[in-house]
Amino acid sequence: MTTVRLKLPYPPTVNHVYGLGRKGTLYMKPEGKAYTERIAWTVKSLCRTTKLFGPLAVAYILHPPDKRKRDIANCEKVLTDAIQASGLFDDDFQIATMILSRGEPVVGGSVEVVITATTPCPAVRKNIVERAVSELSR
């Protein structure tokens, strides 16, 4: 199992990231693009060669920048899409388990992220199968 731990900036809410165009098409606002680019760059620099395959378990602890009431579920999609844009995993469909919790407020806000691949990547899986086959053929 591969586990990645990250500390990232607090995300804007979905309402600040996505908008509806005149013809009803969904688009990403400049604030959303800037956050996605920042997160993608951060994750790529911290996890240079890591790629997570298979089902994932994700845990987010959101530390808001102040004590105002906030809907943490509105932040999850923005955060998940930004991490996906980094290439750490291919599709948020891979997320089989998610824990989303609110932490204590911190200056500027932050998010603690733990992502675990719950099955080995294809290369490791192939190696495991090859070893098992050679053991059986003895």
Image (cartoon, rainbow, N blue to C red):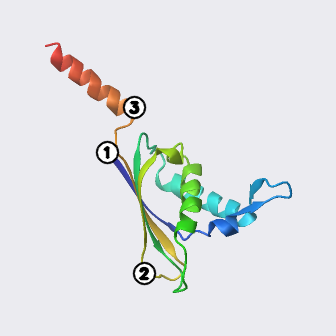
In terms of depth relative to the viewer, which is nearer, 29 or 70? 70
Q: CA distance from mark 2 to mark 3?
A: 38 Å
Q: Residues within 10 Å of mark 3 (few under 14, many from 20)?
A: few
Query: At x 51% / y 83%, what residue is drawn?
Result: 107
Q: From the top left corner, tell me how far across and down residue 23 is, in percent.
A: 85, 54
Foreground: disc 2 or disc 3:
2
In this picture, residue 112 sits left or right of residue 73: left
User: Disc 1 residue type?
Assistant: Met
Q: From the top left corner, tell me how far across and down residue 105 is, in percent.
A: 47, 82
- What residue does disc 3 label? 122
Relative to 38, residue 89 above or below: above
Relative to 68, residue 103 above or below: above
Q: Residues within 10 Å of mark 2 (few under 14, many from 20)?
A: few
Q: Which mark is residue 104?
A: 2
Quarter of the image where one finds residue 115: bottom left
Q: From the top left corner, tell me how far across and down residue 33 is, in percent.
A: 69, 60
Relative to 32, residue 47 above or below: above
Query: At x 31% / y 45%, what residue is drawn?
Result: 1
Relative to 119, residue 36 above or below: below
Q: Which mark is residue 1?
A: 1
Query: At x 38% / y 36%, what residue is drawn?
Result: 121
Q: CA distance from mark 1 to mark 2?
A: 29 Å
User: Disc 3 residue type?
Assistant: Pro
Q: Quadrant of the C terminus?
A: top left
Q: CA distance from mark 3 to mark 1?
A: 12 Å
